[in-house]
């Protein structure tokens, strides 16, 4: 996974958005840490490149109240191409959108 990136935000301490390919299965992960106990939600979307744009393949959502939220999902690849994960983190109303590195299948 991509290393955790320190974020300069009021409520978000750090986050990590990553995508790995193991054989024909993608492992997507979105991790966010809050500075204090908070209401946290994550929407993680697997995307495939279509020409110069990106199309959504599937998405997952989770939420909690606490100090961190770690969302990990697997997806069996079907169509060849370039893939990435978009993760939208919301912590106590503060929202950021992040992307993983691109992975070719």
Image (spheres, rainbow, N blue to C red):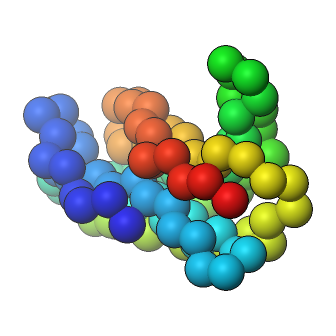
66 lies above or below 54: below
Position of residue 5 in the picture relative to residue 54 (left or right): left
Q: Residue at x 65, y 45 (%)?
A: 82
31 lies above or below 48: below
Q: Residue at x 67, y 80 (%)?
A: 23
Asked whether residue 44 appears in the rendered view, the answer is no
Residue 40 position within the rendered picture, expressed as x and y whole percent measured from the top left: 43, 52
Position of residue 98 in the picture relative to residue 102 (left or right): left
Front in this rendered view, residue 45 or 25? 25
| In the image, farthest residue toward the top | 52
Write down the quadrant of residue 4 in the picture: bottom left
Q: Residue at x 56, y 65 (%)?
A: 28
Asked whether residue 86 appears in the rendered view, the answer is yes
10 lies above or below 26: above
Residue 37 position within the rendered picture, expressed as x and y whole percent measured from the top left: 26, 59
| In the image, farthest residue toward the right | 78
**In the rendered image, which quarter contains the N terminus?**
bottom left
Position of residue 17 in the picture relative to residue 44 (left or right): left
Write down the quadrant of residue 61 in the picture: bottom right
Residue 48 position within the rendered picture, expressed as x and y whole percent measured from the top left: 72, 41
Residue 16 position within the rendered picture, expressed as x and y whole percent measured from the top left: 33, 56
Front in this rendered view, residue 45 or 78? 78
**In the rendered image, which quarter contains the C terminus?**
bottom right
């Amino acid at each position: 996974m991509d290393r955790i990136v320190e974020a300069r935000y009021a409520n978000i301490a750090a986050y990590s958005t990553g995508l790995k390919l193991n054989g024909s299965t993608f492992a997507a992960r979105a991790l966010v840490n809050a500075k204090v106990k908070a209401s946290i939600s994550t929407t993680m979307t697997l995307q495939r490149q279509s020409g110069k744009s990106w199309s959504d393949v599937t998405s997952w959502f989770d939420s909690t109240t606490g100090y961190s939220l770690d969302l990990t999902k697997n997806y069996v690849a079907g169509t060849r191409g370039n893939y990435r994960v978009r993760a939208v983190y919301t912590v106590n109303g503060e929202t950021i959108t992040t992307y993983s590195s691109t992975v070719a299948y």
